[in-house]
Amino acid sequence: MILGIGNDLVDIRRIARSLDRFGDRFTQRVFTETERARADTDTHPDQRAASYAKRYAAKEAMAKALGTGYADGVHFCDMEVANLPNGQPTMRLTRGALARLQALTPPGMVAHIHLSMTDEPPLAQAFVVLSAIPKG
């Protein structure tokens, strides 16, 4: 069962300008420590900006899939792009985002987050599908 779908398209150059202009103020407000560590391993400025842009798009797509945007207690840092052991990207939710996902999930079901991210400069895109399957 599909609980929500969201997508987002971001101009990498816009994220690069935010990184240049606001630096840590921007990254600490929007990204978790784990996301910052991952993106900051890309030392080439274009790759670093693209990494942040994909994660930004993923958060926007997740907020849309949750049906709240950044309201009802859902904030940027409540959503973290993470990787499964096989390398597949997913989102780790906490606080308001997790509470919203739990509220969307019918009793007796388990929610799953499907995330796809890509970039083709100057754009980065993310697509999120929230689904639920029966427990067990």
Image: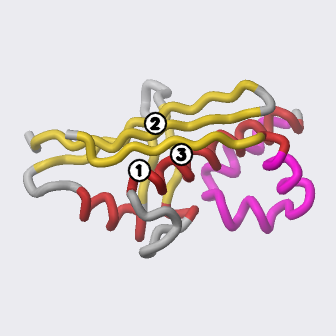
Query: Does the segment drawn in magenta span residue 89?
Result: no
Tell me which label, 1 or 2, sits earlier in the chain. 1
In which image quadrant can residue 120 be found? top right
Q: Which quadrant is home to the N terminus?
A: top left
Mark 1–mark 2 CB contact (< 8 Å) = no
Mark 2 residue element: strand
Image position, residue 135 (x, y; %)? 10, 44
Near-viewer residue (122 or 32): 122
Task: Please indicate whether residue 12 sits to the left or right of residue 75 in the image.
Answer: right
Amino acid marked by disc 2 = Leu
Amino acid marked by disc 1 = Ala
Please report the residue visible at 43 percent of the width from the left and 34 percent of the height from the top: 84
- Cα distance between the residues tagged 2 and 3: 9 Å
Please report the residue visible at 71 percent of the width from the left and 45 percent of the height from the top: 52
In which image quadrant can residue 8 be found? top right
- Cα distance between the residues tagged 1 and 2: 11 Å
Mark 3 residue element: strand
For label 2, count other residues whose C-alpha is less than 10 Å away and answer few (under 14), some (14-19) or many (20+). Answer: many
Amino acid marked by disc 3 = Val
Mark 2–mark 3 CB contact (< 8 Å) = yes
* Residue identifier under label 1: 65
Image position, residue 118 (x, y; %)? 62, 28
- The residue mark sitting in front, 1 or 2, is 1
Q: Which quadrant is home to the C terminus?
A: top left
* Residue identifier under label 2: 115
Residue 127 numbered mark, or none? none
- Report the magenta stretch's main SS: helix
Residue 81 numbered mark, or none? 3
